[in-house]
Image (cartoon, rainbow, N blue to C red):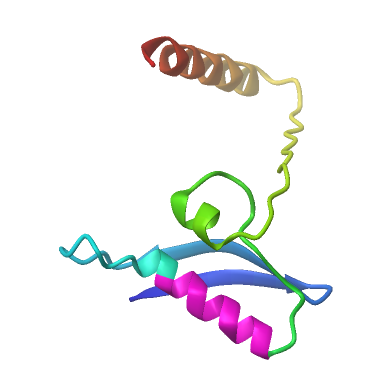
């Protein structure tokens, strides 16, 4: 049981976000089922592509027929609050990388 928020542009569907209800039974994969149904739906409507929009997840790897790199860019004004945020992100990333 789930809901998906997608964008359509130029005859392509771009997956953006979903909310899922997870069952206690581990064999039931609501995300995989949701995407499978949506891919079939959009295929029947004549869309050319269902883009899972980057990032690695097992369900994306299972459903995808190919992958492309997703590049993100963040532009910020030179303000103290943004500089502090960037420092915090670097510290968090450093801690994550050194713990693995």
User: Residue 5: which quarter of the image?
Assistant: bottom right
Q: Is the magenta stretch mostly helix, strand or loop?
A: helix
Closer-to-camera residue (13/77): 13
45 w.r.t. 51: above or below: below
Assign the N terminus to one quadrant of the image.
bottom left
Q: Is residue 37 left or right of residue 78?
A: left
Assign the C terminus to one quadrant of the image.
top left
Residue in view at x 72 percent, y 38 percent: 72
User: Residue 50: which quarter of the image?
Assistant: bottom right
- The percent coordinates of residue 84 (x first, y second) are 57, 16
Q: Which residue lies most toward the bottom here? A: 44
User: Residue 53: which quarter of the image?
Assistant: bottom right
Residue in view at x 53 percent, y 52 percent: 61
Q: Which residue lies most toward the right here? A: 10
- The percent coordinates of residue 95 (x first, y second) are 42, 13
Residue 26 is covered by the magenta coloring: no
- The percent coordinates of residue 46 (x first, y second) are 74, 87
Q: Is residue 13 left or right of residue 94?
A: right
Q: Which range is magenta?
A: 33-44
Q: Total label count?
A: 0
Residue in view at x 60 percent, y 59 percent: 64
Residue in view at x 43 percent, y 66 percent: 32
- The percent coordinates of residue 24 (x first, y second) are 15, 63
């Amino acid at each position: 049981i789930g809901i998906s928020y997608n964008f359509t542009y130029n005859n392509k569907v771009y997956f953006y976000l979903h909310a899922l209800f997870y069952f206690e039974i581990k064999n039931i994969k609501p995300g995989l089922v949701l995407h499978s149904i949506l891919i079939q739906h959009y295929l029947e409507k004549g869309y050319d592509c269902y883009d899972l929009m980057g990032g690695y997840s097992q369900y994306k790897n299972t459903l995808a027929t190919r992958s492309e790199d997703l590049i993100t860019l963040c532009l910020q004004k030179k303000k103290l609050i943004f500089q502090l945020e960037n420092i915090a992100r670097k510290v968090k990333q450093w801690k994550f990388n050194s713990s693995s």
